[in-house]
Image (spheres, coloured by chain):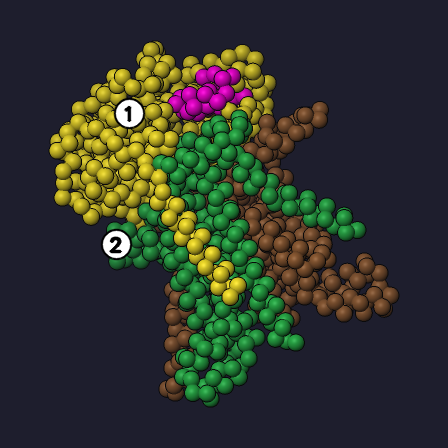
Chain colours: A yellow, B brown, C green
Amino acid sequence: MKKLICVIIAVLLISGLFVLSFLGESNTEVDVVDEKYYENDFKGIELNVFNWGEYISDGSEGTLDVIAAFEKKTGIKVNYTTYESNEAMYAKIKSGSVSYDIIIPSDYMIARMRTEGLLKEIDYSKIPNYQFIDDRYMDAYFDPENKYTVPYSVGMVGLIYNKTMVEEEPDSWGAMWDERYKGNILTFNNSRDAFAIAQFYLGLDVNSTNKADWDKAAAKLKEQNPLLQGRVMDEVFNKMEAGNAALAPYYAGDYLTMADVNPDLGFVYPKEGTNIFVDSMCIPSNSKNYEAALMFINFMLEPEVGLANAEYICYATPNTEVIDHPDYSLAGNEILYPENQDEIKTEYYHDLDDETRKYFEKLWEEVIIN
Amino acid sequence: MTKAKSGQVALNAPYLLWAVAFIVVPLIFVAYYAFTTADGGFTFQNIITFFTHKQYMTVFWRSMLYALWATLICLLIAYPFAYCMSKVNMSSQRMLMLLVMLPMLMNLIVRTYSWQQILERNGLINKLLESIGLEPVQFLGNAGVIIFGMVYNYLPFMILPIYSSISKVDKSLLEASNDLGCNAFGTVRRVILPMSLPGILSGITMVFVPCVSTFYISRQFSDGNIKMIGDVIEDKFYRSSVPDYNIGATISLVLMLIILISLAVVNKFSDGDDESGGGVVI
Amino acid sequence: MSKLRWIFIGIILILLYAPIIVMIVFSFNEANSTSIFEGFSLRWYKDLFQYGGDLLGALRNTLVLAVLSSVISTVLGTVAAVGISKMKKAWVKSSVMSVTNIPLMNPEVVTGISMMLMFVFVGKMLDLANSVNFFTILIAHITFGLPYVILNVLPRLRSTDKHLTEAAMDLGCTPVQAFFKAVLPSITPGIIVGFIMAFTMSLDDFVISYFTNGTYQTLPLLIYSMTRKPMKPDVYALESIMFLIILVLMILLNVIQNDDKKKGARLKK
C-alpha cells in the first residue's frame, strides 16, 4: 500500500513538472510590415533553426518571444537548437548528420562554408524586408556578390578593463603583456581570437598565410602565458562584473551588459586595430524547407522583431529600420555605433586555406598545452 | 526446438540484438575511424601520431596523474566517511545515503558554474577570508583545483560502494575480533578492510574512469588554462577549426582500451565478488 | 567519538552541497547576476513561469526523453534480466554481463562518440536527411539506462525462490501467467529502483546527449550552449525546482526500498 502511494506521488510529481513546462505565455504580439506575406501553405512542416546560444529575443521578462511569434504567425513549427561556437556548428553541418534550414555563422565561417559548397543561394526577391539592411554590410568579402547571406548582427572586439585595477587607461593591446597586471589578464579561449590579439599587437596580418607570421604570433602568445589568469568565453561576464580580473578582450555589446553591473569597467578599441564580425543568416545546401526558410529570414528582418533582437543581444544591428526606431534604447550608443567608426582600424577574419588552418591549430596546441 | 528453448530465445533476443547494435557495433566504429585516414584508407598513422605527438602525450600523462590523485583523495575521504556512516543508527544511515547520492543527480554544468562563483578571486570564500583579515587566494586556474573539482564530482561514487561493502560485514565478526583481543584499529585493519576490499576496488574504478576522461570540469575549474585528454577529444570533434574524427577516435580508442584493461586487472582482484559487480548498483 | 564522527560527516556534506546551496540562494537574487547578491526576490521564478521561453521548452524535451527512455529500458531490461537469470552456460552469462557493463564502465565521452560515429555512418549510407535526431538520442539514453535496470533486477531474481514458478505452474498457470503472478511481484522493487535510476540519469545526462542529439535539445545541452551571454539566475531557479523534485523522488525511492526490507525481514522470521 505504502509502495503504491509512493509510486503515485512520483508519477504525479513528474507529470506535474511536465504540466509546469507548458505554463507561461510569452509575448508573441508583433506588427509586421506586410501581413499578407506570411499567408502560406507550409502548415505541418518543421523548420530546423540552428543559432548561437542566447542570440535571439526569447521572451524573458515580457520581451518578444521571436520563435513563438513566428510559429503563431505562420503555423510553421520551429525546431530551435543552439551552438556554442562557429566550429561546433560547422562540425555538425559538415558531418551531414542534420539538415538545418537556417544557420547564423560569422563571416570567416561563411566564407569557408561557401567555398565548400555547404550553402544555398538565397532568393532575395522572396525577402522584401531585405531592403532594410544597411548598405555598409553589403558586398562584404565573404559574400562579394550578395548571394548567400543576410546580415543578422554586427560586433567588434575591444579591450575591457577595470578602472580600479589598472594604473592608466589602456589604449593598446600591449596592456595584455604588461607585467604589472600579471595574474589579472584574461584572453579568449579560442584559437582565432587569441591569435588575432597577438597579430594586431605585432602589426601582423590576421589573415596571413605566411607560416613565419603565425610563428611570431605564437611566440608572443607563449610570452603571455605566465601573465594570464585564464582563457575564457562567457565566464568573462562573471569575472569582469565581480572585479576578478583587470583586463579582458571581448565583444563591445557585452561590455555594455557588464558595465550595467559593474560601473568601474571601461572599454577601448585598441589603436593597433581590432576584429569586426558580421553574423549572417544562411541556408545550408541540404535544407529541405527552402521557401519557409526565406520566410523565417524575412520575419527576422521585421522592424519590431529586429528591435527585440537588437535589445536582447545588445550588439549593433545592420537593420536601418531598427536603428531609426524611436524605441531603440541603444541608438547612438558610442560603444556600439562609435562616431569615429571610420577611424577605428578594423579587420574581418578571412577564411584561411586548409594548410594554414592546420598549421595555426597545431601552434595553438603548443601554446595552450605546456 | 522445444517450447522452453523458444521461450528462452524470445526472452533474450531483443536485449542481445540491442546490445550488439548499440553497444558493440559503435565501438567497432571507433576502431574503424582510428585505423583509417580521412579518405577511408587503412593506416596505423593515427596511432603513431598519438604516441609520438609531444602535446598529446603531455595531456595523456597529465590526465592519468590527475585522475590517480583524485581517486586517491576520494578514497582517503570516502573510506572514513563510509565507516562513520556505518556506525550511526539505521535511519540516519539511510538519510545519509540519500544525501550523498543527491548532488550527483544534479546538472553538472550548473554545479560547476556555481563552484566557480564560490572559488573566484572575489568569490564567497575569499570574501569570507577577507572579512577575517586574510589575503584573498587565487583558487581557480591550477592543477589542484581541477583535482578538487573531480573529487567533488565523483566522491559519491567512492562512498556508496565502500559503504555498501562495510555495512555487509557481519556484526558477529566484529564482536569475535574484539573477543580475540583486537582493538578498534586492529578490527578495522584485520577484519573490515579486507572485507570491504571489493567495495574499494569498485569505488576506485567508478571514480578513476570518469576522472581520466573528463572534459568541461577541467576547462571550467582551470579557467581554460589546463587541458585534459577529454578536452582534446572534444576539440577534435567539435571545437577545432580543422575537425579530425580519425585522431579523435584514436584517442578515444586508446583511452578505452587502457581503461578496460585496468578494469580487467581490478576484476581479477575482486574475483570473490559475484556478478552484481560490488557497488556498480548503487 | 560519536560527535567527531558527525563533524566529519557534516564537513563532507557541506562540501557536497555548497554549490547547490549557492545555486538555490542566487535563484532568489533580485539582480540579474549569479555572482553578486542584491536582495531577495521571486523575480526569476516568476519570469520562468510567466513567460515560458526556451528553458521550459528544453525542460519539456528533457522530460519526454527521460520518461520514454526509462520506460523502454525498464521493460527491455527486465525481460533481459529474466533471460539472463535463466542462462545455463556460465561463459554465455558472463560474456553477456560484460557487454551489459560496458556502458557503465566506458568513459561517457567514448560512448557518445562511438554512437555518433555509427549514426552518422548509417545515416550517410541510407542517405537520411537527419542521421542524428530524436530517435538516436532516445536510443542512446535507453542504452545507458539498460544496465541500471538489469543490475537492479538480477539480484532480486536470484533471491526469488526458484520453485515459485514451478509451484505456480503446478497450480495450473501458464509460464507467462506464472511470471506475472508469482515472480513479478517479488522483483518489482528492483524494477522500480532501476527505473528511477535510469530516469534520473537521463534527466541529467550531458556528455552522451552532446554527441547524439541532432535537433532535439535537452536542458543540459541548452545550458552548455549559453556562451554568448552569462547564465542568468532563471537557470538556477529551474534547477532549484528540479533539485526539489529529485529530492522527493529519492525519498520515495528510499521509502519503497525500506518498506521492502522490512517485509523481507518479517518473512525471514
Residue, x 41% and y 50% (percent of image)?
A: A16
Left or right: A200 as drawn, with respect to A102:
right
**C235 over C154 or under it: above or below:** above
Residue C95 visible: no
Left or right: A44 as drawn, with respect to C190:
left
Give the CA distance from mark 1 to mark 2: 38 Å
In magenta stretch: residue A259? yes
Residue B206 visible: yes
What SS does tag 2 mark? loop
Residue, x 29% and y 44% (percent of image)?
A: A79
Q: Amino acid at mark 1?
A: Leu
Task: Give the percent coordinates (x, y) of residue A137.
Answer: 25, 23
Task: Give the percent coordinates (x, y) of residue A288.
Answer: 21, 46
> In this view of the protein, which residue sits in the foreground, A7 or B155?
A7
Residue A307 — which label? 1
Left or right: B85 as drawn, with respect to C138:
right
Task: Give the percent coordinates (x, y) of residue C206.
Answer: 45, 48
**A214 over A166 or under it: above or below:** below
> In this view of the protein, which residue sits in the foreground, A340 or A59?
A59
* Residue behind mark 2: C128
**C168 over A92 or under it: above or below:** below
**Magenta residues, start to end:** A246-267
Residue B130 — which label? none
Residue B263 occupies quadrant: bottom right
Task: Give the percent coordinates (x, y) of residue A129.
Answer: 18, 27
Q: Amino acid at mark 2?
A: Leu
Other-residue count near label 2 (Cα within 10 Å), few / some / many at <14 / 14–19 / ≥20: some
Residue, x 32% and y 16% (percent of image)?
A: A331
The residue marked by circle 1 belongs to what chain? A
User: Depth-wise, is mark 1 or mark 2 nearer the camera?
Assistant: 1
